[in-house]
Image: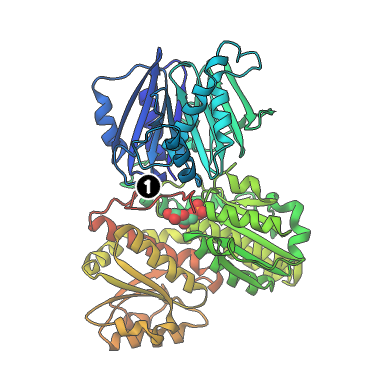
Amino acid sequence: MCGIVAYLGKKAAQPILTEGLKRLEYRGYDSAGVALLDGGALQIKKTSGRISGLEEILENPSYTQTLGIGHTRWATHGKPTTINAHPQTDFSGKIAVVHNGIIENYGTLKTWLKSEGVEFVSETDTEVVANLIGYFYNQYKEKDQCDKENGQCRFERAVQRSLREVHGTYGLAILCSDYPDMIIGAKKGSPLILGVGNDEYILASDASAIVEHTTRAIYLNDNEMIVVEPGGFRTLTSNNVPVTKSLKDIEFSLEQIELDGFAHHMLKEIFEQPKSLETCMGGRLDVQDSRIVLGGIAGKLRDLTRTKRLILTACGTAFHAGLVGEFLFEHLARIPTETEYASEFRYRNPIIEDGTVVAAISQSGETADTLAAVEQAKERGATVIGLVNVVGSTIARTTDSGIYLHVGPEVGVASTKAFTAQVTVLQMLAIELGRRKHLSSYEAAKLIEQLAAIPEKIKTILEQSEHIKQIAAENIHHNNWLFLGRGFNYPVALEGALKLKEISYIHAEGLPAAEMKHGPIALIADGMPAVFIAPKGPQYDKIIGNIEEVRARGGRTIVVATDTDTEIEQYADHLITVPDVPEMFQPILTVVPLQLLAYHAAVLKGRDVDKPRNLAKSVTVE
Ligand code: G6P
């Protein structure tokens, strides 16, 4: 993981780097650092912990250099100490590197460099890259005078040569103190974007660190390098083939990623859902003409309609959205569907036959396992589509076609508005495929109308936020919770449990309610909270039975039920209500109170809601 940012321009680089790092902090926050370059001297400042700690070190004196690189770390190789923080430098102290990714052959390279007399100070794989560049830089010493002849300087050649030795993934930004007007970037498997402003350039892991300065950017592809100098930039492959890139518009604004009066990004994103789902459906769901227009997959609709088997693959919250999709495609489009963890799919020997479609679901579009699953599926000849939020992300570019979520940036590490949008996109796709196969026009029209009405219905759930906070307050002293649901609401139970554990650190387990009797029921005692997702639907009576089983054993029930249900109160120690909608649309509504429950529990427990320990928003390592 990790976030990288680099600046070259006319302004002081330091505040631009630290602001950029704060926007990238969702990618990891174990340590932070910057390297600034002025007139041949590298200034490196770094610390374990957050960007705020780095700012304290940088406060006095303030630095005026106009070129620099910065990093926020999610530790992989080596503990989150200051020594292991980036930038990492080479043995000569001339080369400084920030890195996002994993160098898989770092052990071999380190052993070899050590045998050449190079000493290491950190435990990181990144220091190997710095030393490798330093090593080749020294090798090219004698050619220094003539190396501009082939359009490349010694620094660039050393980077290029080093990249040929490196296996693994990287987004890199590199400085060399002998070249005080140059930043070199390189990408393989980790994202890297160059924002192009007026006389200034910002190289970063994603657009959130760039939009404050410019909305024009180029997106690097794997195995590409970029050399940025005051007059412009050049892109080339690591094999030295020049590449022409075109400028693209970054599609989200700074306002979208700021807090807007909310205490946390997560809360803002939960409350944004009525709006974000409207945006997600906007221009796609045509209630008047009873049509669904999914432009991004228009060219693939024939293939998709003939799908014989659909595999949904994803990680984390997106995986739970996929599980809802499984029910949807079977129910509405009669397509055999299975949902696979991307991390498992990629290492299996999947059977991809004619008519197999793989749909990758990812908020960030950068999750390493999901990307690898996409590559595996493509290699085996599947039609691969992406359901992705971040426009221009790697998965979006790697899939054959796709549907963007269009909910704007999601900053809180715990995914909320992306989940409801993922489910919405799956619903639109399932209805459209169903319509092309066997649903009558009347049925399709009805479904389109019902789906279009969902965003407005979320508002009545958000109004219960204070009530849900009270429920959280009365139960957070319990260290173990169960989340139980059936059918379409079984994935919601998994998601509710994930939300609670990831941000409040309370242990929670999500289950299909009927499975409780096969083991987990043994846990129920002494007021243990059991959250039931029990809206009116085909399995309502069954879940009431499960609620009774928990109450009979001393469990405490928190029940999410339909607002018109007059019976339910007698079964609930705590009741939260959602509007009445058909079962297939329920997950979008029933997940919202669980997001709020987890949020309030975490705040009441004094947790860092937007940056929970050990996690990162975008997991670009295996
Ligand atoms: C991380 C995040 C989760 C997210 C998962 C998949 O674990 O903390 O919130 O669901 O990655 O991310 P993606 O960007 O692929 O949806």
Q: Is residue 123 left or right of residue 471?
A: right
How far from the left and from the top, in percent, is residue 460?
A: 41, 61
Name the amino acid type tagged 1: His
Q: Is residue 191 left or right of residue 461?
A: right
Q: Is residue 585 visible?
A: yes
Of 41 and 480, nearer the camera is 41
* Residue at 32% over, 47% down: 79
Q: Is mark 1 within 8 Å of ligand 1?
A: no
The type of colouring in the image is rainbow
Label 1, on which residue?
A: 265
Q: Is residue 453 visible?
A: no
Crowd tier of the residue under label 1, counting other residues whose Cα lies within 10 Å: few below 14, some 14–19, many 20 or above:
many
How far from the left and from the top, in percent, is residue 543?
A: 43, 83
Of 464 and 159, nearer the camera is 159
How far from the left and from the top, in percent, is residue 497?
A: 38, 67
Quarter of the view holding residue 158: top right
Of 430 and 609, nearer the camera is 609
Q: Is residue 165 left or right of residue 9?
A: right
* Residue at 68% over, 53% down: 294
- In the image, residue 20 sits, relative to residue 422, either above or below, namely above
* Residue at 43% over, 38% down: 126
Quarter of the view holding residue 370: bottom right
- In the image, residue 10 sits, relative to residue 492, either above or below, namely above
- In the image, residue 539 sits, relative to residue 562, either above or below, namely below
Q: Is residue 344 left or right of residue 516?
A: right
How far from the left and from the top, in percent, is residue 143?
A: 57, 15
Q: Does dot 1 land on a helix, a strand or a loop?
A: helix
